[in-house]
């Protein structure tokens, strides 16, 4: 078995083809180093210009790979900033950074691109270049196709760890007793997904009283936000949410006569926005 292998890329986004290649590579070497290279300014201008998805921060990609490999003790994940100017020197600087972070002689370099053969021969002269599913037969997908055609069209090619990042969140808001809870449940059933119910009602049901206190509203907002994160892992493409933190803020103002900065902070974390409901 080979000793030290390297497999790198930008992974914008990670798809099952990448996961398949990673698992293959991990069986061929005693130690596999996964490299997430990034130049976020270049990515915004080239990879994501006109794309159907927004730029993905490299820390998100790094976390995805660490989650995917957390049970694989011989697989190590690193992030390398690799400026893109269109010159071969970019590859040279990137290779030096990779060698520095690995700190060992690399005897195997993995990729799925025949076109990289000459580059790797120059940059890693003592390493063998092994191609992994170069024709994409196992998973006929590419990150380029996902970016240009959108994640919803290629949802099944995304690893489960990646999917929550792309779930579209839709908040249903309005005054009390207008049917929001029923609407959220029905929409979730219609789109074969899950939903988040209003926490405020269950919060006071658990207390056995609807007498409010200032501290209630932050607790409600936090509990609601955590429930959203939980349900994102179960949702299929879209998540319907009954009420959100700005509504909780309005209740704080109405019942306690106080605007709470902490609720504005939770509202900024929600990332609701205009969207089109995806076709299923």
Image (cartoon, grey):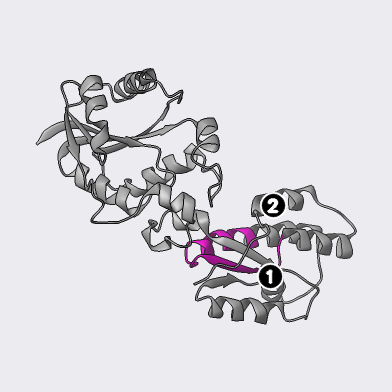
Judged left or right of residue 152, residue 127 is left
Indicate whether 38 appears above or below 71. above
Q: Position of residue 221 (x, y in %)?
A: 69, 59
- Quadrant housing the N terminus: top left
Residue at far right of view: 257
| Magenta stretch bounds | 224-244
Locate residue 190: give its quadrant. Answer: bottom right
Regarding residue 104, the answer to whether it shows in the image is: no
Sequence-wise, the earlier of marks 1 and 2 is 1
Locate residue 188: give its quadrant. Answer: bottom right
- Kindly identify the residue that appears in the image at 43 percent across and 24 percent down: 86
- Kindly identify the residue that appears in the image at 51 percent across and 53 percent down: 165
Indicate whether 185 appears above or below 91. below
Q: Nearer the viewer, residue 134 or 71?
A: 134
Judged left or right of residue 225, residue 124 is left
- Kindly identify the residue that appears in the image at 48 percent across and 43 percent down: 60
Indicate whether 166 appears above or below 196. above
Q: Position of residue 3 (x, y in %)?
A: 15, 31
Regarding residue 271, the answer to whether it shows in the image is: yes
C-alpha distance separating marks 1 and 2: 18 Å
Kindly state the secondary structure of the residue where label 2 is placed: helix
Say which residue label 1 marks.
203
- Label for residue 132? none
- Kindly identify the residue that appears in the image at 28 percent across and 56 percent down: 139
Q: Position of residue 237 (x, y in %)?
A: 50, 65
Q: Is residue 220 magenta?
A: no
Mark 2 Cα shell of 10 Å, populated few (<14), some (14-19), many (≥20): some
Say which residue label 2 marks.
266
């Amino acid at each position: 078995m080979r000793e030290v292998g390297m497999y790198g890329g930008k992974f914008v986004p990670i798809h099952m083809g990448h996961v398949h290649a990673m698992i293959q590579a991990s069986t061929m070497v005693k130690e596999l180093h996964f490299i997430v290279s990034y130049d976020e300014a270049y990515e915004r201008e080239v990879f994501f210009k006109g794309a159907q998805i927004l730029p993905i921060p490299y820390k998100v990609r790094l976390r995805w790979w660490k989650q995917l490999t957390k049970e694989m003790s011989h697989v190590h994940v690193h992030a390398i900033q690799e400026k893109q100017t269109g010159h071969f020197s970019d590859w040279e600087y990137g290779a030096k950074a990779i060698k520095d972070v690995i700190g060992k002689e690399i005897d195997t370099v993995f990729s799925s691109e025949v076109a990289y053969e000459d580059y790797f021969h120059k940059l890693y002269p003592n390493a063998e270049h092994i191609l992994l599913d170069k024709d994409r037969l196992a998973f006929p997908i590419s990150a380029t196709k996902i970016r240009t055609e959108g994640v919803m069209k290629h949802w099944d090619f995304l690893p489960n760890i990646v999917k929550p990042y792309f779930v579209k969140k839709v908040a249903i808001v309005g005054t009390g007793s207008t049917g929001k809870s029923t609407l959220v449940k029905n929409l979730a059933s219609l789109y074969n997904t899950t939903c988040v119910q209003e926490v405020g009602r269950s919060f006071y049901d658990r207390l056995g009283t609807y007498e409010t206190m200032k501290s209630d509203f932050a607790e409600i907002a936090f509990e609601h936000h955590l429930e959203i994160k939980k349900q994102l892992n179960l949702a299929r493409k879209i998540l319907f949410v009954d009420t959100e933190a700005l509504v909780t803020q309005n209740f704080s103002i109405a019942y306690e006569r106080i605007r709470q900065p902490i609720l504005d902070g939770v509202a900024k974390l929600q990332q609701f926005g205009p969207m089109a409901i995806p076709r299923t």
